[in-house]
Image (tube, coloured by chain):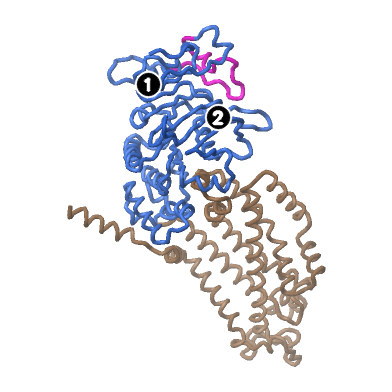
Amino acid sequence: MEMSVTAAKQDAIVFKKQSQAKEIWRRFKKSKGAVAGLCIFATIILGLAFADLIAPYELATKQHLADKLASPSSAHWLGTDAFGRDLFARIVHGGRTSLTIALLATMSSCILGSALGAIAGFFGGRTDSIIMRALDIFMSIPDILFTMAVVFALGAGFTNLLIALTLAYFTNYVRLVRSQVLNLAELDYVEAARAGGSSSLRIIVSHILPNAMGVIIVNTTLNVAKIILYESTLSFLGLGMPPPAPEWGLLIADAREYMRNAPYLMFFPALAIVLSACSINLIGDGLRDALDPHLKS
Amino acid sequence: MGDVILDIRDLTVVYKTDLETVEAVNGVDLRIGKGKTMGLVGETGAGKTTTALSILRLLPSNTGRVLKGSIAFGGIDVLALDEKKMRDIRGDRIAMVFQDPMTSLNPVMTIGEQIAEALVLHNDGLGKEDIEGRVEEMLSMVGILPSRKNEYPHQFSGGMKQRVVIAMALACEPELLIADEPTTALDVTIQAQVLLMIKELRNRLGTSMLMITHNLGIVAKICDDVAVMYAEEVVESGTVEDLFFGDRHHPYTEGLFGSLPNLSSRAKRLVPIPGLMPDPSNLPEGCAFEERCGKRMDICKNLHPATATSGTHSLRCHLFNGGPER
């Protein structure tokens, strides 16, 4: 009798409840790449959050023609551009707009695309056909043309840029999530959930989407990088944020003319883009592994 | 019959695709008394699972159709309910245990969350702690340490998973439990454990049960009544005594028993039933078993036999057209 009580106690200790977030964090920590990514990304975010303390906004916009195209020095850490504006300040402040737009656009395209994809895949039949055919029409227009049209129609600016990027990027989520849902909806546990009285919405939200999460997260992190680049493309074409607001894509576009004499003008903004994109990808990989209970050890 | 929990009459279900119409259930009559267990026996494709799914109205929505017949559950016409009312019944008053425990649990939810789901859906009044308490109670009832409720399905073995599935189904104390071959995916020793547990819980909770199986041993062990299905229809039904000790049987039932090994007699060979079940999209005009039957008569080819009943024992065969005499 006493034996079994002790055994039960021991088991209770072994199977002690560990909170979900703690558990995910424990597994996330195991991946060195993911932790490195998180550190880099956290540094970037902190830097951008306290941008005004590091480099006043004035430095980024006020022209000092006397100092134009100065090489990196103690006065201007990363040098100055053709108008004598401090490059470091421009990168730090530009990152605010760039990253905010990229993250928001990724999130909104992910939510819009996943919702449509889940609905199409789960209900099938006519709903599926209508959504997918509409998507086909959507996708047959070249991305860049489509976004240009949207920005021209609505005018350049933060919100409109967000709308344009969302519309350009939600399509691949629809296809991705739909294909996942088509597979998952056939599984027994979905049938079991239905037999337990769950509604369709509940089945999608609590049974199907969590199982498709790994794929969605990886795709999302890859997309952040793509959207940062795409946004630069738009800025390059003059459809991004209106100048003189600094923005990473715009910085690179401007630097193009001085590539021979002042390569740092192009190098540092590009480095900022690469670092943020890489760190987000690393975080995504780590998160995917940490969220998958199969790999739990 | 007094208290009947489930009354299926003349149920006919078809699966309709662009190419063909497949008859999946053809004029099935089933009656389950309160607290009784009905065994539904038959080979793969005989329409057992389709019958079960129609009770819960879970037929694949784009192909499955109930053509005629009625399903009454506790006096409610299940086929006439709207989707919302149907959802209230599923999981709360009728629960189902699926065949394969490996795939019927969601891999990214803890087992505690999955058992709690039906409770949350069907008991608005319950607080978080009540639900947690009930989950733990269910787990210990099926013989799993309540402290394991925060673990994921992959951390359990097959038999343990089936226990979890059963705990999920019983969480709301349903009036009717449909068990679709609950032990087929388990190995023999675990089968015995799970069956014993199902039997015990059924007795304790007084749940009525529809046990779908192709194992006659299970039927003998836990069922009160049996229905044998062949080619989409019930060919013989009665109490367990009628089936196992009665002297008149449908030739198909005889074939089923003939193909079982027997411990007490020294048969050299088992006697399988020759041939295959007819194509459900193209059923013969006469008796569906005619081609494989050892006792076929001229009439079998042309006329579909009607059901003849005597007492609790029903047979659908021309041999007993006057009703099985006892």
The chain coloured brown in the image:
A
- The colour with which the image depicts chain B is blue
Q: Position of residue B82 (x, y in %)?
A: 59, 44
Q: Position of residue B110 (x, y in %)?
A: 43, 55
Q: Which mark is residue A154?
A: none
For the residue marked with disc 2, what is the amino acid? Leu
Q: Secondary structure at mark 1?
A: helix
Look at the magenta stretch and give its main secondary structure.
Answer: loop
Looking at the image, tell me whether mark 1 or mark 2 is earlier in sequence order.
Answer: 2
Please report the bounds of the magenta region as a residue range: B272-295
The reply, left or right, for residue B268 in relation to residue A196 is left
Judged from this view, the residue extending furthest toward the front is B2
Label 1 lies in what chain? B
For the residue marked with disc 1, what is the amino acid? Asp
Q: Are labels 1 and 2 on one chain?
A: yes
Q: Which residue is mark 1?
A: B242
Q: Which residue is mark 2?
A: B11
Mark 1 touching mark 2, by CB under 8 A?
Answer: no
Q: Position of residue A282 (x, y in %)?
A: 54, 65
Question: In the rendered view, would you say A152 is above or below A123?
Answer: below
Where is the C terminus of chain A found, in terms of image quarters?
bottom left
Q: Residue at x 45, y 24 (%)?
A: B228
Q: Quadrant of residue B32?
A: top left
Question: In the rendered view, would you say A85 is above or below B7?
Answer: below
